[in-house]
Image: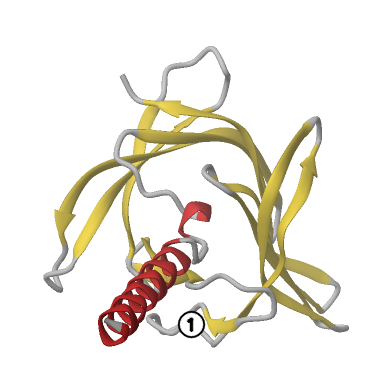
Amino acid sequence: MKKHYLLYFTLTALLFSACSSETDFEEIDLGYAFFPNESGKYIDYEVDSVHYGITIDTVNFYLRELVAEDFVDGEGQPATRLERYKKFNLDDDWELTDVWSQRRTTTAAERDEENRRFVRMIFPAEDGKTWDGNSYNTLDPWNYRYSRKDLPYTLDDLTWGETITVNQRNNTNLVDQEFAFEVYARNIGLVHKVFTDLNFQNGMITGDDVEWKYIGSGWAE
């Protein structure tokens, strides 16, 4: 009789341990919610872009990024079509201007932008983790780094309770000013983007200064 009780308690303990381990694994937050990839969802931004050269060209417009249908890319991998629309006044109709693509795997979130692939995020998303955002293109390496995971972020009159910041570049000297970061909100996606790449030589400024600000999101009809 004692042997039967011992066997029963041993099996019960093993079953409880297995269930507990499975539950713990399911509750691990890998950070996928910072980069939703759901077909039909869109995010709208107000974009300010300044190009410095012989002249200074300033453009303000509205951008919509719509996650469209899934497909299999040229490498045989599942990907998602990303449709990009633009307009210059809120009352105007959206006009399709670009088609990019993106994919979110178990380990990374990648976007193909103008035939260049960028690794925008890696998983699990953890403060201090670093990676080369340009590892799949021919640009110079940029060492991305996570910070401020799950902290609130305020932009103008909007506040998100759980965000993560991807610090992409911070290189400032007498000749160059390179500064870039992206902020992602949980269950929404990218909400703020700053990209500054300026060069100061021969009394001239050349380069670009761009900022995206989230203004709304929703589902396509």
Residue 207's spot in the image, x, y percent?
A: 67, 65
Q: Nearer the viewer, residue 161 or 111?
A: 161
Residue at horizontal 54 percent and vertical 87 percent from the top: 141
Taking the image as shown, residue 158 lies to the left or right of residue 117, namely right
Dot 1: element: loop
Residue 219's spot in the image, x, y percent?
A: 39, 26
Q: Which residue is mark 1?
A: 139
Taking the image as shown, residue 70 lies to the left or right of residue 48, namely left
Residue 109 lies, with reference to residue 162, above or below; the image says: below
**Could you say which quadrant of the image residue 52 lies in?**
bottom right
**Could you say which quadrant of the image residue 128 lies in?**
bottom right
Residue 149's spot in the image, x, y percent?
A: 69, 63
Could you tell me the amino acid type at mark 1?
A: Leu
The crowd level at tag 1 (other Cα within 10 Å; few <14, some 14-19, many 20+) is few
Residue 144's spot in the image, x, y percent?
A: 61, 77
Residue 161 lies, with reference to residue 51, above or below; the image says: above
Circle count? 1
Q: Dividing the image into 4 quarters, which one contains the C terminus?
A: top left
Residue at horizontal 56 percent and vertical 70 percent from the top: 125
Residue at horizontal 51 percent and vertical 77 percent from the top: 133
Q: Nearer the viewer, residue 106 or 46?
A: 106
Residue at the far front: name it: 1
Q: Dividing the image into 4 quarters, which one contains the N terminus?
A: bottom left
Query: How is the rendered protein coloured?
Result: secondary structure
Q: Nearer the viewer, residue 88 or 152?
A: 152
| Residue 52 showing in the rendered view | yes
